[in-house]
Amino acid sequence: MTGLQRTALCLPLFVISPYTLADIEALDDKSMSQVTGQSGVTIELATRIDLDRFSYIDEGALSIYDLSLSDMDGSAMDNMKLTVDVAGDGEVLEHGFSEIARRANAGQLDTSNPDVADALAKYAVGGSFGKQFNSGDAVIHLGPVDSGDPTSLADYLHSVDFALDIGSVKAEGPVDSTTLFSNIHLEGYLGPTDIVIRNAGDATHTLANGDTVSDSELQLDTHFEITDGSLDWDVGDVILLFNFAGVGIEGLQIHNRWGEDTAGHFGMASATAKLSQGTSGSSGHEGLSIHDVEFRADIDMPVFKVGGTSIGTVQFEDFVISNTNMMVYGH
């Protein structure tokens, strides 16, 4: 570099520094809190997942073989839109069925429908539609790119379809292995799904079971519907609802259209959970706390086979798992 080039490069800095750099000051916390960025990021997503084997290995192994996640027709899952935001203090962001509330408020949906009325009451917040969050909360919302006719609930609820296939689930030892489930096929629709990372610093609270958990947590909320499913339940001792083997299920449906807790779910099953660092109140062990777990669904198994012979239909109405907390740690 010549002397002239060095002079030319330094000249802008010399001109700027007396007048501009002298006014540069560090922002304090109050000033930083008033600095905001853009309104988030939107990601349109299409994907297909195939996995030959997934194993958890200790002395033996629990393995899932031949997993695939795709569209119902076997192509990539598509028509999915992820919105990613970091909330300001009290900001209202898209969550759950807030899009339904927005359409209802615009007169596009009939508010005499109890599901629509519930969504409008739940997600209309101060002139916006969604859920109110705290400063620094990271919010990821999954919904459809194209939900069809804005006046059609069916179009919205059936916008994102999927198919999940698993060849087998096996418990494996050094010599022997046992097939727990096989020939699993599930297809249906994915409803609004939310992942929220709560920003609460070092704050904690105590659960009803005595576990102490961090207020900074990962929150999962999803709605879905299984319209057709089948599986072979090769070892029935795994789940204590039934205690026999050789079970086959065909025509499985999981939804929320029956019973007394249907309002606000639009016929879809729902699942929620929170994950954070925690300390067991009984053992004192530190680990991963999975708490406030809730699952709500109606389950219809029109063909329930034992030993290859149908014994009739099995149904569960208002099947609810709630008040469920787990502490996971190594031993």
Image (spheres, grey):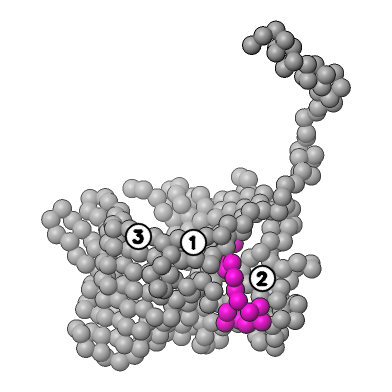
- Quadrant, the N terminus: top right
Looking at the image, the residue that sits furthest to the bottom is 312
Identify the amino acid type marked 2.
Ser
Q: Residue at x 45, y 47 (%)?
A: 286
The span shown in magenta is: 139-155
Task: Please report the residue visible at 31 percent of the width from the left and 67 percent of the height from the top.
Answer: 166
The residue beneath circle 3 is 50
Q: Quadrant of residue 104?
A: bottom right
Q: Who's the residue at 39% across and 65% down the image?
A: 69
Around disc 2, counting alpha carbons within 10 Å, would you say few (fewer than 14), some (14 to 19), or many (20 or more)?
many
Residue 86 place in picture, x, y as percent: 66, 51
Residue at 78 percent across and 16 percent down: it is: 11
Q: Is residue 311 left or right of residue 33?
A: left
Magenta span includes 254? no
The answer to whether residue 261 is visible is no
**In the image, residue 260 lies at what x, y percent?**
55, 86
Look at discs 1 and 2 and give the one toward the viewer. 1
